[in-house]
Each structure stands twice: as C-alpha cells, then as structure tokens.
Image (tube, coloured by chain):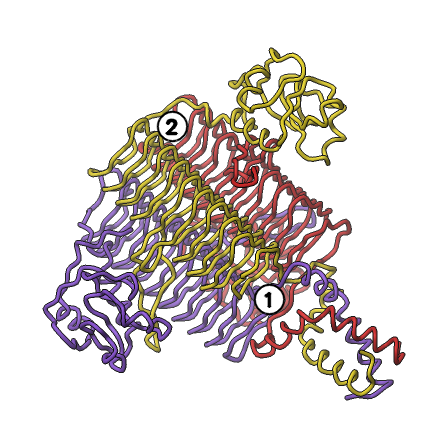
Chain colours: A yellow, B red, C purple
Amino acid sequence: MTDATSHCYTLHDLAERLGARVAGDGSIRVSGLATLSDAGPDDISFLANKAYLKHLANTRAAAVLLHPSHADECPVTCLTLDNPYLGYAELSRLFDPLAQRPHLGVHASAVIEAGAALGADVQIGPQAVIEAGAVIGDRAVIGPGSVVGADSRIGADSRLHANVTVCHGVVIGERAILHSGCVIGGDGFGFAHDGSRWHKIAQLGGVVMGDDVEVGSCSSIDRGALGDTLIGNDVKIDSQVQIAHNVQIGDHSALAGCVGIAGSTKVGKHCMLGGGVGLSGHLTICDGVQVTGMSLVTNSLHEPGVYSSGTGAMSNAQWRKNAVRFKQLDDIAKRLARLEKHHGGR
Amino acid sequence: MTDATSHCYTLHDLAERLGARVAGDGSIRVSGLATLSDAGPDDISFLANKAYLKHLANTRAAAVLLHPSHADECPVTCLTLDNPYLGYAELSRLFDPLAQRPHLGVHASAVIEAGAALGADVQIGPQAVIEAGAVIGDRAVIGPGSVVGADSRIGADSRLHANVTVCHGVVIGERAILHSGCVIGGDGFGFAHDGSRWHKIAQLGGVVMGDDVEVGSCSSIDRGALGDTLIGNDVKIDSQVQIAHNVQIGDHSALAGCVGIAGSTKVGKHCMLGGGVGLSGHLTICDGVQVTGMSLVTNSLHEPGVYSSGTGAMSNAQWRKNAVRFKQLDDIAKRLARLEKHHGGR
Amino acid sequence: MTDATSHCYTLHDLAERLGARVAGDGSIRVSGLATLSDAGPDDISFLANKAYLKHLANTRAAAVLLHPSHADECPVTCLTLDNPYLGYAELSRLFDPLAQRPHLGVHASAVIEAGAALGADVQIGPQAVIEAGAVIGDRAVIGPGSVVGADSRIGADSRLHANVTVCHGVVIGERAILHSGCVIGGDGFGFAHDGSRWHKIAQLGGVVMGDDVEVGSCSSIDRGALGDTLIGNDVKIDSQVQIAHNVQIGDHSALAGCVGIAGSTKVGKHCMLGGGVGLSGHLTICDGVQVTGMSLVTNSLHEPGVYSSGTGAMSNAQWRKNAVRFKQLDDIAKRLARLEKHHGGR
C-alpha cells in the first residue's frame, strides 16, 4: 500500500551501493522492490531462498538480485551478490518511503519543556512532549504523540514512531527504532508484603539500551528496581514483548513477539527467543541459546543450543484423552517399572 | 457505571427495531438493559441461555426478550424472537451511550496536516494527529490522542478510540472499531544476519483491512515486508493480540485475547482462536478451524475442527512428578514396547 | 540512571520514619539507596535476603538496614528492623525522584473539556485530555498524553503516567498507579453470531477499581458487558496483562506480566498468578490460590494452594522425541493396563 514512486535508481547505482555486480544493462531505472511473482517492469526483485527459484523464470521484474550461481537462470538483467538476502535488506531500506520524507522540524504543537536539549536537525512531531532535562540526539525523530520523560536521553539518529513512551531517566542508544505504543522504563513489579497487604517498592533504576536496538509495537521494558535494566547493542525486540526489571539482554539477541522475561534474568549474546517464550526470573541463559515458540524456561541454560517445552497441537478429541493421561504419568512410569521388575524385558 | 438514562424506548419501538413480537403492553417505556437478576422496573432484560432460566420467574425487569418457547414462563411483558442473543446484541447497541453522544466536530487542538482529507461529519478528538495524505471517511470518529499516519485511509463510519495509532500507508475499512492503545501498521520483524549482526529489512508493505473489523486494546497488527498484511471482512480481534507481517486472516474469523500469529501465516474464514493461542509462521489454517486456549500450532491444518495442545492445571506437587516423567516419555514408550515384545499382552 | 542527589536524610530521620533503631551514629547523612555491592559512602543499603549476606562484610555503604540478628556482622552503622524488606520498600519511596518533583499544575496544552471537575492540587500534563463529566480527585497526577474519558472518576492521590487511557464511565480508586500505555475500560469481546457473521454486543458496563491498585505498562482491563469489571483493593497488576469483561479480582491479589483472564472469571483474594498464566472464562478461583508461570487453568479451583500445568524446557532433540510420545499417551496407558492384566505386577 506504500507509494514508492518517489524512489528511482539505475541498476548501476544500486550495484554500487550494494557492492553487487550488474550482468546486463546498468542504465535501466527501477522505482520499486517486489517479490519475483509480484514485481512489474519498474521493479527490482531478489532471489534469496531456493524455495522461490520456481518463480525466477517467469518474473516480470526489470532486474533481479541473486547469487552468482543463479545468474544463468535469470531471464532479465541481474545484480549478483554473495549474500542476496543481505542485499535485499539494503534494497528495502533504499526503497523505504520513511527514509525519503521531508524534514519536518519541530512541530508547533509539540511541548518542549524548559531544560530539554534538542540536537541538530531533530524532528519532533505534533503533540509530542519532551520533558525537562531530556536530551534528544542529532537527527533523532520523535513521532506524533510520543513522550520523552525527564532526564532521558535519545541517541543520535534514533526514531520514535507515534505514541511511544520513554519514561524518566532512560537512556536510548544511537540508531534505535521504537515502534508505536511501546513503553520503555515503566516501573518494574516490586512489592513487599507485610502479611496482609502490599507495599510498593519504588523502582529507582532506569533502562539503558545500547546502539541499534529495535523495539516493536506495544512492547514494554521495565526500569530496574535499584540498578538498571540493560539492553545490549543490536538487540531486536518484536511486538508485545515484556521485559521485567533488571533483566539483561546481550548484544545481537533477538526476541520474537509476545516473549515475556521475568525479573533479573540475564540473556546472553546471539540468543534467539521464539514467539511467546517465557523465561522465569533470576536465570542465566548463556550465549547462543535458541528457544522455540511458547516454551517455558524455568532453569538456567549453560550450553548453547536449541531448547523447547510444551506439546504439539492435535485434534481436541485426541488431546483430551492424552491430556488426562498426563496427569497419570508418574503413576504410569511407576507401574511400568514394577512390571519390568517382575517380568524383566529391559 | 454507565449512565444510560438518556435512552428511552417503548417496547413497541424496540420490537419494531428487533423484528420481535410484543406479548403484553407495548407502550411500556424502558430506559436501560440489564441481566435478569440485576434489572429493575425501568429495564428490559433478556433470556438467551438456559442457564439463566432460573432467574426468569423472579426478575424485576419491565420486560424480557426471549424465545417464544419461554413466553409462558415470563412473569412480565415479553418480546419474543427466534434468536434472542442476536436481539440482545441489537438492544445493547440501542442502549450504548457512545452512540448517543453529541457530535464533536474537529477539536481545535487536533493537528490536521496539509494534504489530509476529512470526509463529511467526521469527529476528530483533542490532541489527535492526521498526517499528510491521510483520508478520513465520512462520519468517522478519531479519538483523543490518536494518530493517523501519512497516506492512510480510514473507512466511513469507523471509530478509533483514544490513543490509537494507525501508521503510514494503512487501509482501514468501513465501520471499523479500533480500541485504545492498538497499533496498526508497525514494522514487521525482519532482519538479515551477516554472521555477526542484524541488518534491518525495511517493511514496505502495509496493512489492508476489510469492513466491520474490530481490534482490541493494546493489540498490534504489523505491516507487510513487501506485500500487505491482510485482515478480511468482519474479523474480530480481541485485546493484546499480535499479528505479524504478511499474515492473512479470512473473513468472519475471531481471535481472542493474547493470540500471537507469526509471519506469513494464513488463517481461513470462520476460524476461532482461543485466548493465548500461538500460530507459527508460514502455516495455512483452513476455514472453520477452532483452536482452544493457549495451544501452540506448528503445522498447517487442512481439516476444519477443534484443535488443542498443552496440559491441564493440577496441584503443583502432582504436576512436578508428572512433568519430570514427561522428560522420560520416549524412554517409557520404548520400555513398554520391549515388555510387550517379550511378554505379549497386545 | 536516576539522579537521586536531591534526597538527603540523616540516619536518625530514616530510623524515625521506618520505626527502626540506629546502632551507631544517627547524624550520618545519606543521599541514595543501593545494593550492598553497589552502594558507596553516601548510600544506605539493606539486607533482606540471606543470599546477599556474603556482601555485607565488604559493603562500602554508609549504613545498612537489616534484621537485628545480623547487626553484629555489619561493618558500618546499621538500622535494625524486624522486617527489613518492608523497610527497604519504604526507603525506596523516600528516595524516589518522582515523589520530589516540583508541582506542575495544569499544563496549558492540556484539554479540559467543559463539565470536567478537577480536585485540589491536581497536576495535568502536557497534551492530556480530560473529557466532559470526568472527575479528577485531589492531588491526582495525569501524565502527558493521557486521556480520561467522559464521566470517569480518578481517585485522590492517583497517578496516571504518560499515554494512559481511561475510557468513559470508569472508576479508579485512590492512590492508584497506572503505567504508560495501559488501557482501562476498552470494550469487552462480545459478539452474537447469526450463523454467517458477527453482531457487536455493545459493552455497557464499566470498570470499577478499589484503592491502591497498580496496573503495569501496556496492560488492558476491559469494561463489562452489562455489569462492571471489578478490581479489588490493593490489587497489583504487572505489564502486558489482559483482563476481560466482567472479571472480578479479589483484594490483595497480584498478577504477573502477560497474564490473560477470560470473561466473567472470578479470582479470589490474596491470589498470585505467575507470568503468562491463562485463566479460562466463567471460572471461580478461591482465595489464596497461586498458579505458576504459563499455566493454563480451565476449571474452577476451590482449594487454596499452588497449581501448575505444562512441561519444562529440555533440549529440542530430546523434546521432539517426548512430544511425539505425548500424542500416544492414551495408547501407552491402555497398553500398560493390558500388560498388567495379563501379567500382574501391581
């Protein structure tokens, strides 16, 4: 639905930006990026996954970015690159209409409190609020309705989309992308119980993020109780994710949608958590761990690798029978051991 | 807590609107709608579920909407209808205070950027933002603090409650209801890995919704990577739901709270996903599938029916014993097979 | 990251506020609160968990709050208290920079609709909206970009952080804390099906909260269909929680992140739901129930105690084998029973 007509590049231009090689006419101009099957004569396309090779022969694209080994099969001009998926990522950014929007400056309706500091060339959208003591880095974009709390810092070249909330005393690194509805620095969930009721523990820590972090729509990252919640460099967080107080996420880790991480758990570098994964509190997850979707992890993981829990879906009728038996599982195991003891068979 | 005193209908009026038949005095006026046990002498009530039949005899309601087969048991005037639950739905809308609010027009504090187009009789709440190129359909209501991004279209008679975000290049159909805090068109979660770090894949697609879609509070529907994320007609989405990029949801499907659907999965028509259900990416779920609460589906489903996964709750002591045995299940199965082989019994 | 230098107390002051006893020099001044290992010479620290006792001997804190039984081991001045964790909670609030912010009054950019009533000493942040008929209690704080809907009431001394949405006809008690992005009073998920499509059931109830309730970032509490959704006193709700229409939560219960509760379920008093727990609709959960993380409860629970469901994480390779066997579990149980019948062993 996005109108990309304002972008127009020659294949030569693109090849230069991507470090690719043109096989064919480099003067051809393309104004859009599309899949092999959807692309039209003004589009460039790409082949990065063999599953789509079947669409290559019939593509109507003006040109295709692909691995050199597929150049011979390409019916149109091609750009060759060793990692065409990376090349696709770069192309996508070149055709992103957001990157080509006019500079909007600071909107008249935005509220910049006294004592806030705005860097060079910042854009502050309508109805945004920058509280006292906040520092907005050079070229940062603060979307409409977004709020940057007192004494928080937004790194250079970061973008807060619309209706983002960065609470007080939070540090966002450079080139961050915070999507709409996300909340960085809400209170962690801390209470002391006196035997009959709860007493709030004020959350005095903050959130400190490295550079190149992305946070999805409606995700929440809570501030620390005393120390800070720490998000490393190049950490990618999807939508609807909950990160509790004093969690630490190592560099380059990626968390898919609906992940929930309880307080003080440390996730290593280069970890990948599938959608809906839950991590209990106070765990240590080492570097290089992957957890598959909707698994619950209640113990620390000290070896890299892939981990899972749960059961796969089946028909409800079949499931009902098996789920009942799950409640008898310990009994089943004991009865089996008894049979083995009496009758052998191992 | 909602004051419904401004609504007042005769039973005759109501019967006409619902296509119901009055058995009794049609000139009785009612000003509210309540359950059989809560209703007072100014209220109409309804019986749509036999579980509540026991409350009929003692209701203090002025009138009751019910199936003709229960008319004889009704101690007060009744409206009869073949599907009283549908009738209740219609009554509820007649007594909805939102439907009777004064027209507010475009609030002075709202920001309507140059190049945005407002239809006839639109209402734009305080602090709302309509970006350049956005088109707001006739009679649409944009709540306080909501943002409609550049080049997005909101269909006629749609309502965005407060603090909704519709990102750029999104199409919302007619009669949509978007609840507070929801985000339509945030970026999908797409990155290419170069072996050491992530490179963002700009999300160039949009979100295209049919007519009569409802989206709950704090839900997120991500924009497509290249093509669009597609939400059919009459799709109902509850709160805290995450729909990833390029997902397709067929007409008339309903997704309960906390559902998460990973990228590119296609859900058919007339499907129902229970609360907390997770669907992996790139699946095809056929028409007429129901999945029970908190189930994980990792394979395509080609037959309509009810599906489930997981285990039911039990006491933690019992659960601990059984959960440990789950880890031995393959071993248990093999040992059983060995015993059977040695000792027969099948 | 929070600058706490504006707080400064003598140990004597603190002891008096906490009801603690100073062992040492009560005139020492402290300006911060930190853990035993992080504290510096201007900080007070605390020992509330024996796991941290090992850090006591080497702490650089000016003073430590602890149980009298540990006073002898403390190398610095100490404050003794029977429940040092409760004392820590109180200290945390004394050092909370939010509590010491200057009073901001009603910001010029806030929109207060005609017919809204503001109590004494309220603070209304920039870009906030108070709709007609809303009542804001004395000393309440409404954060930037927050919206209080028509005819809603915010109790005295409550705080709505930034970008909170309280819909129309909602009652928030006293001393509530509502974190950014949360939505109180969005529509419940109610539709009647006519055999081919959905008809909306307008949600005519509200949400009524007791006093001392806290709701985390991006959580949603839906309004009732006819009666109200009810949240008791001293209920603590974490981030990303979904509470459906007509749910009731008893006093002093605590719900961790990502909990989802389906419609009309009643949760008792003093219950604790772990992260990601799901409760089906129309259940009754008695007082004093605890449910461990990511468990699904589909039946009412009539006995206090700890409940669980699910399976623990293991290596994906091990899990695949066991998960397949789960689908055979009923068969395994029947085969075992057959073997037992033929060969004894019980």
**B172 relative position to B292: left or right:** left
* Front residue (pair A276, B268): A276
Position above or below: C153 against C47: above
Q: Quadrant of the N terminus of chain B?
A: bottom left
Name the chain under label 2.
B
Residue C339 location, quadrant: bottom right
Judging by the rendered image, the residue that carries numbered circle 1 is C312
Residue A160 location, quadrant: top left
Q: Position of residue A251 (x, y in %)?
A: 46, 47
Position above or below: B22 against A175: below
Name the chain under label 1.
C
> Which dot, 2 or 1, sits closer to the camera?
1
In the image, what residue type sits under mark 2? Ile
Q: Residue at x 67, y 74 (%)?
A: B325
Q: Residue at x 43, y 73 (%)?
A: C269
Label 2 and label 1: CA atoms lie apart by: 53 Å
